[in-house]
Image (cartoon, rainbow, N blue to C red):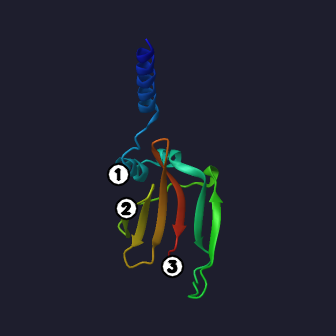
Amino acid sequence: MKILRIALVVALMISATSVFAQKTENFKTFWKSFVNDSVFQMERTHFPLTYIYFQSEEIEEEHDDMITEDVSAEDWRFIELEDEYSKNKIKKENDYYIVEKVGIENGIYIKYTFAATNGKWYLVKIVDRSI
């Protein structure tokens, strides 16, 4: 009887673990929706969103004058992530995906950071180093 109870407890623990262990969605599948669907993009952006950018268009070599803002959902606008003026490089770094938007001879350089929460990818930070 005692062995039966132990086996039952172990079986329940294994089944509970599999129910609660979520697999993170495929990033490339997520990315296609994020790029093309404005509602999905809004839903999958963590607010307030950290947005870091240069203070002015004149960038001094000695100073890296960056400003950090928190963007609210009310201030959010759809981001055009794929266009003919830039290319995207997608990199996996630890538990994050970084998408680098690199301009084609135009000075665009933006890093978008995505983190998984409850098995779903969310945009959590933008660093715009465009010149």
The picture places residue 76, in percent across and down from the top left corner, at: 58, 54
In the rendered view, tell whether residue 17 sits above or below residue 77. above
Is the residue under label 2 in contact with that under label 3 (CB below 8 Å)?
Answer: no
Q: Which residue is mark 2?
A: 90
Report, in whole angstroms, how far the alpha carbon at label 3 lies from the one at label 1.
28 Å
The circle on residue 127 is: none
Q: Residues within 10 Å of mark 1 (few under 14, many from 20)?
A: few
Is the residue under label 2 in contact with that under label 1 (CB below 8 Å)?
Answer: yes
The answer to whether residue 116 is visible is yes
Report, in whole angstroms, how far the alpha carbon at label 3 lies from the one at label 2.
21 Å
Which of disc 1 and disc 3 is earlier in sequence?
1
The answer to whether residue 83 is visible is no
Secondary structure at badge 3 equals loop
Q: Residues within 10 Å of mark 3 (few under 14, many from 20)?
A: few
Which of disc 2 and disc 3 is earlier in sequence?
2
**Observer-nearest residue: 18 or 128?**
18
Amino acid type for the residue under numbered disc 2: Ile
Q: Which residue is mark 1?
A: 28
Outermost residue, front direction? 2
Amino acid type for the residue under numbered disc 1: Lys
In the rendered view, tell whether residue 15 sits above or below residue 77. above
Secondary structure at badge 2 equals strand
The picture places residue 98, in percent across and down from the top left corner, at: 44, 61
Horizontally, residue 71 falls left or right of residue 32, namely right
Q: Which residue is mark 3?
A: 131
Report, in whole angstroms, how far the alpha carbon at label 1 lies from the one at label 2.
9 Å
